[in-house]
């Protein structure tokens, strides 16, 4: 096996800003709050930080706050900085930070994702202009939202495998139930299957509760060299393996398989870099920008066979906190809030530290799967408690 | 459809993409085709993605296609697009690896199914001819 560079690295600190539906605070303001909390959590000071990494690396409603903005705001002396959207999804920012630390380019890197979509959406213009290439064949047909694009995948999955709305509902209800134990979650009122099935449709087969909750918030983690583990105030949470593959075509509608997306390739590339297997995974924090995406990750990562994601989650007991694969224990983006991938990473670290409070799963978990993204931008990571 | 109000489709092609949006003027759907290996590709590129040949031309296809998947959109995402409406991904008859995201029109939304045979109809929209599709049956 090739050298697994990411095993040189640990997630030494985590921090989140205030999270809310509409905070009307600037993206930079939220980012500074999350970053300083993560630095403090790692037992470091800003003088120790010599790198910044973020996705997608620009400001605005979608970008939240750019890396240069944070760099200047913290007045820190950097050896390395990166921010870009053309990477392995949101977690690509973590992937690149791990590579930079392994390569010796930096020692401690703040990695963050900030969203101000809650308040941003209320203010933004409704008219799109200057469409990027990938959008120029979608928006003209009223396919303006990822809800439409991913709904098409979900519909095809239903057609090929008999997946039902009730099975998608099990993912949404699990998320809502778990969110009740997360004081930062956006939606915490209990949800029944009737509630799920009767809510208004957004883009079939997706109803409102299949779509994540736009919010404002920032999540930061510190990626450090494993040599720091001995000085860290926390158990070492190592990056055991990362999945960076993004497959053959970066396209929403031209990808070769209409039921997998490059999630298929991302998962396969992760498993090529570890001796661990699905049975070793104690908890899975899998992206749910839309409910069906979680099912796609469950299948691609091999927790069940292809097309078996529906029966796997049906009824919800298998994915409950006391089930065989505790899933999205913080409420996911469906109920916890659309923190755009990094909420899953934050939760994976908390669970492996055994520090998740009321929602801590039992059995002293040692291995967590974290995955983010859908469509052409995807990435995943396997975290372990302790170094190997 | 030229006598009806048409939605603001925000068609913003690059120069090499314009043929696609003007092709319907003579009633034909066209895709960029390699003059060497004769394969279609989409969206249009400056070379053939299969053999890297650089001599390309738009070629007409039958306009027949199959619904690969679809969604009925209920959310008013864009002003001028009044929900509900059907968004579909169709595979063209000549090469199923060439897909189009499009709208299925002139049919009961509940009747749309994966695997359904459809054919192209063009909506005149300003200077553009927008390729939409409608079911073969009953037309």
Image: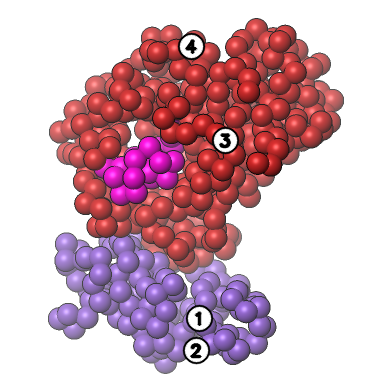
Residue with the mark numbered 1: B40
Q: Residue furthest bottom?
A: B26
Left or right: B136, with A285 as reference point: left
Q: Colour of chain A?
A: red
Which element type, helix, strand or loop, lies under badge 1? strand
Q: How is the image coloured?
A: by chain
Mark 1 vs mark 3: in front: 3
Whether callout 1 and callout 3 share a subunit is answered: no
Mark 2 to mark 3 CA distance (whole Å): 48 Å
Seen at 25% across and 29% down, the residue is: A316
Left or right: A15, with A356 as reference point: right
Task: Residue B59: give its label.
Answer: 2
Q: Give the range drawn in magenta.
A: A284-310
Residue with the mark numbered 3: A274
Question: In which quadrant of the rendered image does the N terminus of chain B lie?
Answer: bottom left
Q: Chain B is drawn in which colour?
A: purple
Whether callout 4 and callout 3 share a subunit is answered: yes
């Amino acid at each position: 096996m090739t050298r697994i560079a990411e095993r040189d690295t640990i997630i030494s600190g985590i921090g989140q800003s205030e999270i809310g539906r509409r905070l009307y605070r600037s993206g930079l303001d939220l980012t500074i709050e999350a970053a300083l909390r993560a630095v403090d959590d790692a037992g470091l000071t800003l003088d120790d930080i010599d790198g910044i990494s973020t996705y997608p690396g620009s400001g605005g409603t979608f970008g939240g706050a750019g890396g240069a903005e944070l760099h200047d705001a913290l007045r820190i002396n950097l050896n390395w900085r990166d921010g870009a959207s053309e990477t392995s999804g949101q977690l690509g920012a973590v992937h690149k930070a791990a590579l930079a630390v392994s390569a010796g380019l930096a020692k401690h890197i703040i990695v963050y994702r900030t969203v101000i979509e809650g308040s941003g959406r209320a203010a933004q213009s409704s008219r799109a202009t200057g469409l990027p290439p990938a959008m120029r064949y979608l928006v003209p047909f009223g396919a303006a939202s990822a809800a439409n694009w991913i709904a098409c995948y979900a519909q095809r999955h239903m057609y090929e495998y008999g997946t039902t709305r009730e099975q998608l509902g099990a993912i949404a209800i699990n998320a809502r139930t778990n969110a009740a134990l997360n004081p930062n979650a956006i939606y915490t009122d209990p949800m029944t299957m009737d509630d799920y099935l009767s809510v208004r449709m957004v883009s079939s087969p997706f109803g409102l509760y299949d779509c994540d909750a736009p919010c404002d918030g920032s999540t930061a983690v510190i990626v450090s060299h494993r040599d720091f583990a001995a000085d860290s105030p926390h158990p070492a949470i190592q990056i055991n393996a990362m999945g960076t593959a993004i497959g053959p075509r970066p396209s929403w509608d031209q990808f070769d398989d209409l039921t997998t997306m490059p999630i298929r390739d991302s998962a396969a590339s992760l498993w090529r870099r570890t001796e661990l297997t699905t049975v070793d995974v104690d908890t899975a924090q899998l992206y749910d920008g839309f409910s069906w995406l979680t099912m796609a990750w469950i299948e691609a990562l091999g927790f069940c066979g292809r097309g078996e994601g529906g029966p796997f989650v049906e009824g919800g007991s298998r994915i409950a906190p006391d089930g065989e694969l505790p899933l999205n224990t913080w409420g996911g983006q469906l109920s916890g809030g659309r923190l755009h991938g990094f909420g899953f990473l934050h939760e994976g670290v908390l669970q492996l530290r055994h520090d998740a409070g009321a929602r801590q799963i039992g059995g002293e978990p040692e291995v967590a799967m974290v995955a983010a993204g859908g469509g052409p931008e995807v990435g995943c990571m396997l975290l372990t408690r302790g170094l190997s | 459809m030229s006598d009806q109000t048409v939605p603001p489709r925000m068609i913003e092609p690059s120069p090499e993409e314009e043929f696609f949006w003007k092709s319907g003027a003579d009633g034909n759907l066209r895709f960029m085709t390699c003059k060497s290996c004769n394969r279609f590709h989409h969206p249009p590129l400056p070379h053939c993605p299969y053999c890297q040949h650089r001599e390309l031309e738009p070629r007409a296809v039958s306009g027949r296609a199959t619904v690969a998947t679809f969604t009925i959109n209920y959310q008013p995402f864009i002003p001028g697009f009044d929900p509900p409406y059907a968004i579909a991904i169709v595979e063209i008859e000549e090469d199923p690896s060439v897909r189009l995201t499009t709208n299925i029109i002139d049919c009961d939304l509940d009747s749309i199914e994966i695997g359904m045979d459809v054919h192209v109809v063009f909506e005149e929209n300003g200077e553009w001819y927008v390729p939409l599709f409608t079911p073969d049956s009953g037309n």
